[in-house]
Amino acid sequence: MSRVFSGVQPTGNIHIGNYLGALRQFVDLQDGSECIYCIVDMHAITVPQDPKELKKHILDVAALYMAIGVDPKKSIVFVQSDVKQHAELGWILNCNTYMGELSRMTQYKQKKQKSENPSVGLFDYPVLMASDILLYDTDVVPVGNDQKQHIELARDIAIRVNGKYGKTFVVPEGRFMKSGARVMSLDDPTSKMSKSNPNEKSRICLLDEPGKVKKAIMSATTDSEGVIRYSIKEKPGISNLLDIYSAFSGKSVAKIVKEYEGHGYGDFKKDLVEVVNTSLDPIRARFEEIRNSKELVEALKDGAEKASEIAERTMKRVKSNMGLGL
Ligand code: AQP
């Protein structure tokens, strides 16, 4: 059985990009694989966080995992900082990663521009991510397209360590969706939908009320051609909306384009509002119940125990192969 690992940062409200690119895969994979899903709070602190908000977001993300269908009886679900081996392996991997490799990471280059005084943690983020993945002998990492470069780095580090110290790590593979792997912002469809965009109308969050979803979609940037057709280069706004429609409805983009021949953007957007709200309704309903339940915290504690056992076995192997400790 293959082992699956992935995580989401508790840095804000989870949007449909996170869902269509990554979270949806978590549910699809949990019946045929051994799945480990983490709330990566130590990644979140690579940029400043308000402690109260961070705590709230940790539980929100955990409840959302479960509201979309992640079952803690089938999958291990836990909070990253509750398993100390992530940081321990992170240090060891730091010593097997080159400054040049991290300097080339596009996410770091983009995020450092937004920060006046970027932290060492922000620079080192991909190594902690490699540690998350390699700690669990992960075969498959379900993520959005924006994480491709980080997965490549995790693979390079695993191959390097295996070459230097003998077989220590499983070399992981990324898993990317055909539709929804890169959902773009609604206000600027040339940049990816993101939690940190100050414009709330740039994204649709899984817990947004139906009226807010409607406003965001109806005001999404399009173009003046008035024809519904797919061309990321010429029509990034409409193409992004077609991708979202396709990912939520399961219909191919070609079929949707055919259905809307002769229709204007208004009709198309109105129907998209329906499609998105119909998919989000059950998630919103389940979230409230799970978020306020005692079982949520119990499930996370149980998950952290199970994850720690696996992580400790890996750490013993890593330390033994590298000659660390007594
Ligand atoms: N726009 C997106 N389209 C598809 N997948 C996406 N992911 C993120 N944005 C999109 C995927 O969601 C998972 C969790 O992401 P994350 O929270 O760990 O990291 P992030 O990429 O930093 O998310 P944001 O929303 O973009 O946050 P900020 O605003 O803080 O930068 C990952 O699998 C990611 O690929």
Image (cartoon, rainbow, N blue to C red):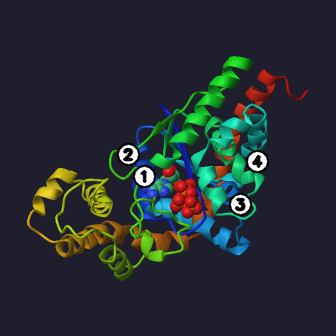
Q: What element carries label 1?
A: helix
Residue at 58% x, 47% y: name it.
106
Residue picked out by circle 2: 177
Residue picked out by circle 4: 84
Q: Horizontal placement of 58 versus 144: left or right?
A: right
Q: In this view, does 280 lie above or below 304?
A: below
Sequence order check, earlier mark of 3 and 4: 3
Q: What element carries label 2?
A: loop
Name the amino acid, label 4. Lys
Name the amino acid, label 3. Ile
Mark 4–mark 2 distance (CA, rounded to whole Å): 31 Å
Name the amino acid, label 1. Gly
Are circles 1 and 3 on residues that touch, CB within 8 Å? no
Image disc number at residue 235:
none
Residue 247 screen position, x and y as percent = 30, 55
Q: Is residue 14 above or below residue 162?
A: below
Mark 2–mark 1 distance (CA, rounded to whole Å): 6 Å
Front position in the image: 299 or 36:
36
Residue at 79% x, 33% y: name it.
95
Residue picked out by circle 3: 45
Are circles 4 and 2 on residues that touch, CB within 8 Å? no
